[in-house]
Image (cartoon, helix red, strand yellow):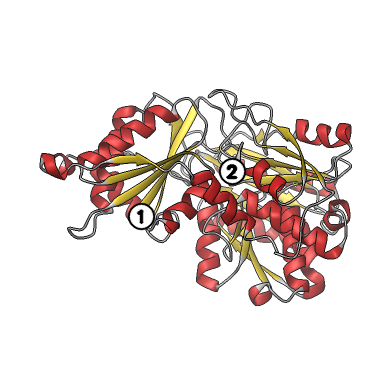
């Protein structure tokens, strides 16, 4: 098998183009139905989706594939990815499927799986599903007519998730008196997020809550938070919250419209947990692309960062391996394992709000504890050449770190999906970061006479 279907977060592509076709979804449903079967008992798989128009096509194709393998299907409709993970655990289904391309435009869609434990699949299970999809083995697995699965809808899934998210918020606190701009990116959180926050007492100023199938993430949400920030200032709100299309990423803004990205939110949450003695091992997990300002924000407690490869799955794997409760990415994909098995934007926002209320401080004060290091980026295309060996990149990085005197951060990362090498340098002096980034990129390019692009 020469083709890889699964990327860093499931399968993703332009809807109605390979691999995101109805035919492929049908085969994925059949493959998943086979892989998740355990014995002769009845099996059930949950399917959720965001608000993309193409979601109907994939929902029906996956359902057909699963039912044709004798697996029953529960459909929850538009629901954030973390809600799908929670509902599947609540209903004790054998697996769950989320149809979403997260923060991407509506033209894209994706399919990602959760195993019986509510966590995303490991490489082994993904490879097993992939092999069945690309081969013909499952063509021979067909139950008798009386063994075909059924499908039905769960009408109260949104309400169940709202109650689950609210339960993560301290029972002795309420949001009365807070005016919050809530930007749902016309995505999966368009009902649950405003309703959950309003039920806790907040006055909601909604943005991006009118999905039409094609406006998801369009000039709104966590990737485009400009309207959310402007609305905070215009409406004189206390803060703003912006979700992405499937509700697993969040960024926030204080009352002045200053943006708090994933690094800043991790800093706020980590400091709150440290003050309460609740950050296990005084350590949080984040990827190598996180900003060094995060380390400085938690330095007063001598707290540490467990650095991981890029991708929320690697963050979660590290958290589970070391018993950590907090992890995430700069994008705002933040995982609080005490509450959910995957990034949960609504619960993240609620925990930040709880920290504000406990300390009786605004988000501008809490967020000021995080000061990002200036950083510079370059992209080095490989132009058909082999990726530089790891030890070669390590030597380049070590020489550059010696030049910085150990002050700052350097990341040299060959992409796992594109023929490029990414260069990132962080330093207190932005000019130093820019100059060193340029020099490192040229040194890598010289290894194979490659070109360097701004990135």
> Can you see residue 439?
no
Task: Note whether 154 is above or below 309 in the view shown.
Answer: above
Residue count near mark 1 (Cα–Cα under 10 Å), binned few <14, some 14–19, many ≥20 = many
Q: Which residue is mark 1?
A: 93
Observer-nearest residue: 438 or 443? 438
Closest to the observer: 246 or 15? Answer: 246
Q: Is residue 159 visible?
A: yes
Q: Residue at x 78, y 53 (%)?
A: 175
Q: Which residue is mark 2?
A: 247
From what the image shows, is residue 425 above or below residue 102?
below
Mark nearest the camera among 1 and 2 is 1
Q: Residue 196, relative to residue 63: is it above or below? A: below
Which badge, 1 or 2, comes first in the chain's sequence? 1
Q: Front-most of 5 and 63?
A: 63
Instruction: Identify the residue at image location x=45%, y=31%.
Output: 13
What's the mark number on residue 332?
none
Dot 2: within a 10 Å radius of its alpha carbon, few (fewer than 14), some, or many (20 or more) residues? many
Front in this rendered view, residue 401 or 286: 286
């Amino acid at each position: 098998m020469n083709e890889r279907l699964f990327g860093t977060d499931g399968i993703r592509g332009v809807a109605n183009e390979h691999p995101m076709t109805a035919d492929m979804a049908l085969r994925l449903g059949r493959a998943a139905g086979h892989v998740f079967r355990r014995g002769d008992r009845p099996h059930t798989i949950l399917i959720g989706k965001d608000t993309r128009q193409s979601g109907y096509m994939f929902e029906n194709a996956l359902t057909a594939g699963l039912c044709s393998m004798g697996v029953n299907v529960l459909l929850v409709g538009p629901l954030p990815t973390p809600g799908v993970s929670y509902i599947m655990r609540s209903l004790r289904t054998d697996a769950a499927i989320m149809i979403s391309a997260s923060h991407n435009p509506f033209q894209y869609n994706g399919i990602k799986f959760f195993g019986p434990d509510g966590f995303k699949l490991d490489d082994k299970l993904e490879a097993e599903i992939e092999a069945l999809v690309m081969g013909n083995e499952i063509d021979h697995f067909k139950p008798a007519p009386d063994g075909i699965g059924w499908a039905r809808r769960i009408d109260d899934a949104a309400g169940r998730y709202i109650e689950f998210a609210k339960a993560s918020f301290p029972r002795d606190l309420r949001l009365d008196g807070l005016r919050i701009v809530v930007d749902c990116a016309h995505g999966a959180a368009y009902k649950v997020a405003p309703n959950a926050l309003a039920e806790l007492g907040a006055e909601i100023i909604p943005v991006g809550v009118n999905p039409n199938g094609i406006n998801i993430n369009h000039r709104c949400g966590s990737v485009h938070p400009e309207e959310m920030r402007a609305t905070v200032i215009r409406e004189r709100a206390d803060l703003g919250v912006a979700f992405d299309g499937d509700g697993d990423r969040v960024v926030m803004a204080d009352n002045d419209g200053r943006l708090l990205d994933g690094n800043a939110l991790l800093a706020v949450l980590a400091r709150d947990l440290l003050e309460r003695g609740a950050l296990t091992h005084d350590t949080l997990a984040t990827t190598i692309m996180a900003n060094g300002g995060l380390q400085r924000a938690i330095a007063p407690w001598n707290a540490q960062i467990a650095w991981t490869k890029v991708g929320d799955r690697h963050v979660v794997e590290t958290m589970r391996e070391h018993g950590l409760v907090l992890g995430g990415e700069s994008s705002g994909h933040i995982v609080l394992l005490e509450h959910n098995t995957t990034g949960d934007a609504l619960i993240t926002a609620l925990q930040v709000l709880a920290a504000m209320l406990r300390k009786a401080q605004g988000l501008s004060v809490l967020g000021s504890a995080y000061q990002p290091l200036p950083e510079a980026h370059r992209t080095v295309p490989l132009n058909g050449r082999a990726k530089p060996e790891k030890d070669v990149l390590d030597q380049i990085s070590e020489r550059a770190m010696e030049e910085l005197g150990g002050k700052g951060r350097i990341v040299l990362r060959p992409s796992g999906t594109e023929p490029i090498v990414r260069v990132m340098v962080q330093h207190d002096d932005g000019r130093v970061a820019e100059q060193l980034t340029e020099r490192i990129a040229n040194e890598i390019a010289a290894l194979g006479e490659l070109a360097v692009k701004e990135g």
